[in-house]
Image: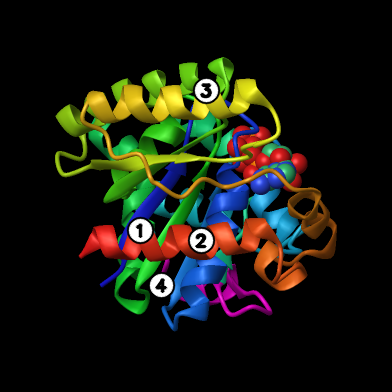
Amino acid sequence: MAKVIAVANQKGGVGKTATAISMGAALVEKGYKVLLVDVDDSGNPSLSKCLGAEAPEASLVDLMLMAFLNRDISKELNHVILTHEEGMDFIAAENKLAGVTDMLSAGTDDYEKKTVLKRIIDEVRKQYDFIILDAAPALNIMSINVLTAADEVIITTQPQGAAEEGIGELISSAGEVRKHSNPNLIVKGLLITMLDARTNYNKSKATEMTDGYTELGMKVFHTRIPRAVAAEECVEKKISILKYDPKSKVTAAYRAFVDEYLRYNK
Ligand SMILES: Nc1ncnc2c1ncn2[C@@H]1O[C@H](COP(=O)(O)OP(=O)(O)OP(=O)(O)O)[C@@H](O)[C@H]1O
């Protein structure tokens, strides 16, 4: 039965997609069965693009519409679940996902509209060890669906003040979701990404964030993901950084992060 992980932060450009893909690829290397789901409704489904599914024949949009209408999605899943060359399965999104968010917002049954994604995830849960949801940098009914479908959240952040604002917002959204639609949701921990160890500001901000959030009782992963150009280049190649540059320090960091995550999960 899969563990469902949301990778989230209510600020954009903080390494959510890079983390979802790299974590997925590193788990596959270890022999786990992984499903990635692009739940980015901001008009930029970057996980889908990074995995080479710019114009999928069928996508999360179709599944969400069917689930919203309480239709049987079991047959549609076969068309929608794609397999990447590195072995992880994924469900792509499209720009049209924003329309689904509008439709959900207009829904009248509060619990029903928050649990549409959960109904989809529950249908595929048995087939995977890990399901990773890549959320949009937003607080709306779609992000509530993400937090409702998840067992746990990993918050990614750059060591910068702006990214930090999104952490507080996400923690308070998780609290709301626990009250109303997912009492078991856990904030698993904070992962510092795109750390530029050459700048003193970045280094001291990373230390400050680690100390501050640890003091508040939150797990801050010891592994920090460094900034490197290879992590940007792999996007064009439609493969993960692990495959694009196996010797990159970012690859080593994501593998170490997955080891740390799995140890912490025991
Ligand atoms: N470790 C890294 N080093 C250098 N660049 C990185 C690294 N991780 C991600 N990037 C780049 O930073 C940008 C933002 O990363 P990413 O798309 O993963 O963030 P995001 O939080 O998912 O963004 P959004 O909220 O807009 O979906 C991308 O161009 C990505 O290629």
- 133 horizontally vs 88: left or right: left
Q: In terms of sequence position, does the residue under pointer 3 or pointer 1 come before the other?
A: 3
Residue to which mark 1 is pinned: 261
Q: Residues within 10 Å of mark 4 (few under 14, many from 20)?
A: few
Q: Earlier in the sequence, mark 4 or mark 3?
A: 4
Tell me how far mark 2 sits from mark 3, CA to CA: 24 Å
Q: Which residue is at the front of the view, 205 or 40?
A: 205
Residue highlighted by disc 4: 74
For the record, the magenta segment spans 73-88
| Mark 1 or mark 4: whose residue is earlier in sequence | 4
Quarter holding residue 237: bottom right
- Amino acid type, mark 4: Ser
Task: Give the Cα distance between marks 1 and 2.
Answer: 10 Å
Marked residue nearer the N-terminal end (4 or 2): 2
Determine crowd level at label 3: few under 14, some 14-19, many 20+ residues with C-alpha closer than 10 A: some
Residue, x 66% and y 68% (percent of image)?
242
Look at mark 2 in the image and give the residue it sits on.
23
Label 3 vs label 1: CA separation? 22 Å
Q: Is mark 3 within 8 Å of ligand 1?
A: no
Q: Position of residue 87 (x, y in %)?
A: 58, 80
Q: Nearer the viewer, mark 1 or mark 2?
A: 1
Q: Find numbered disc 4 in the image and state the secondary structure of the residue it sits on.
A: helix
Which element carries disc 3, helix, strand or loop?
Answer: helix
Query: Which label sits in the foreground, 1 or 4?
Result: 1
